[in-house]
Image (cartoon, rainbow, N blue to C red):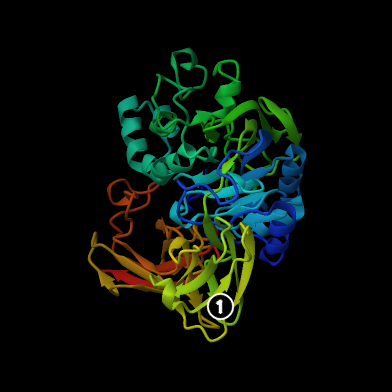
Amino acid sequence: MRQRQRKSSRSTPTAVASCLAAILLLTLGLAGCGTKTEKGGGASASPGKPMTLKVMEFNIEYGGTQVSFRKVVAAIKAADPDIVGVEEAETNTARLAKEAGYPYYNASMQIVSKYPILEPSGSQGAYAFIVVQPGKAVTLSNVHLPSAPYGPYYAKLGKPAAKIIALEQRVRVPAVAKQLELLPGPVGAGIPAFVVGDFNSPSHLDWVEATVGSRFQIKEPVEWPVSKAMADAGFRDSWREVHPDPVENPGLTWWAARPKVSDWNPGPKNPQDRIDFIYAAGPAKATASVIVGEKGGPEVSIPISPWPSDHRAVVSTFEVTPGALPDMVAVDTWLVTVGNELKVTFHAPGKSGEKIVIVTEGGDPAAGVTSAPTGPAGTTDGTLSFATTGWSPGGYEAVLVGADGAPVARVPFWVQAKGAKVELATDKTTYKPGEPIVVTWKNAPANRWDWLGVYKAAAADPNVDWYLIWQYTGGAMSGSVHGMPAGSFTFAETGHAGSPWPLPPGKYVVYYLLADGYESVAQANFTVAK
């Protein structure tokens, strides 16, 4: 939840690449990432050993620096989860992992972990594999749904359930569409799946007849569409799995009573609800679920003082049986600069003659740029390094090629020239009110939660001023968003927390902003004429 008029709080696998190969090979012998979640790995297609796994969901609010970053770290250390899905990390994911003592992180997906994080190319940024045993994994998806318009505010004003449901179906349900479409693949292959995040939407399991009147916004039961969609897709709400009574254990996560800051301070006039969730599907049973938050906060089991965020965190413990990784290949970065080293990790069938081939985008492995063998027969896991000196900027793929010469799995990445900068442009310099705006960019860092924000040109500092409309770039190094807002965003119909669409006449600037934060790396100016 962000209530200032900034965007709500997206892979390049930006884990600690320098030590990845050694740790993978020496401690886990694990796999890379690929496209085929339906095919078992070379070492063994059997499931792993049952184990305990602790998962945390934590919106740290504006990079975790509003109150005390040290207390954000303290909260994670006190909870001691194996995996943390972080919202509003901005550019602090790497710092958080380092200070909390976690060897792996993915800044684009905002995940820190005790286990390696590997993102399948076929996941479309919707999930990553967390490799918890040699050749065995769970999947994790970290989401942050739009914060506005906020459904409980509608309920507080007495809007009927039908209007609230229509709002949720328009604004938030599309934000989990990829997860609901893609995660059944690995779940069907026996790999447990977790979806964590700040959903900015309550649960249909909480707004029931028994809770009507328990909080001022709950005036009638509401079948909140996002939580209902998750349940219909086979995902279990871990808090409710452990605490089935919403009257006795409401599990409120927003808002938390943190110290006041200069920007945004929710208080008693704001409805409190449970909007931060840890969902699980497949062979993963929740055995405990607790809240981490401010001292004296409702149902807080792990208190931290002062509490550093406007959200409380949730930690759920699971008994899981990890599934076999598919044969796959991964790169340590989706965007490499010419001259830098590219690391490619693989999980292969283990037959003699297998190799990794680098090809231009869509290319035939028989005519690759370069290649290297995976190793002798029986080698199922490893990491290879490739020098990129002399490569031309553009799109490439790392391909795992089988003993028969056929591609087994492939993953895309991009190469940029030294000194390349993000370029951002609009298709026109002047628009009529309501006319679609096409924004294009290239040479971007391919972070899933990079975003485009439109501001009034007279107030052109995204660190201080409020955006008007916005759109995630979705982890694309180059591309376009047609008709901002676009895709699943419907600001043209509803506005965003009172923001105007169509934009009124005036001068504007659109920024390319990094990693769910407010650091601008490119901008373009345009005018809306009368």
Q: Nearer the viewer, residue 45 or 36?
A: 45
Q: Residue at x 52, y 54 (%)?
A: 327
Based on the displayed image, in which of its 4 quarters is residue 504 positioned? bottom left
**Mark 1, residue position:** 337
SS class, disc 1: strand
Q: Position of residue 239 (x, y in %)?
A: 58, 27
Q: Position of residue 480 (x, y in %)?
A: 35, 66
Residue 441 can be seen, yes or no: yes
Based on the displayed image, in which of its 4 quarters is residue 56 positioned? top right
Q: Nearer the viewer, residue 302 or 460?
A: 302
The local crowd at label 1, few if under 14, some if 14 to 19, many if 20 or more residues have their Cα within 10 Å, is some
Q: Position of residue 459 (x, y in %)?
A: 46, 66
Q: Nearer the viewer, residue 459 or 416?
A: 416
Residue that sits furthest to the bottom in the current view: 390
Q: Residue at x 57, y 28 (%)?
A: 238
Q: Is residue 483 above or below residue 243?
A: below
Q: Quadrant of the C terminus?
A: bottom left
Q: Nearer the viewer, residue 507 or 476?
A: 476
Q: Residue at x 44, y 42 (%)?
A: 185
Q: Residue at x 57, y 39 (%)?
A: 266
Q: Is residue 195 above or below residue 530?
A: above
Q: Is residue 335 above or below residue 321?
A: below
Give the residue type that dot 1 points to: Thr
Residue 520 can be seen, yes or no: no
Q: Position of residue 267 (x, y in %)?
A: 58, 35
Q: Is residue 59 left or right of residue 521?
A: right
Q: Is residue 518 above or below residue 161?
A: below
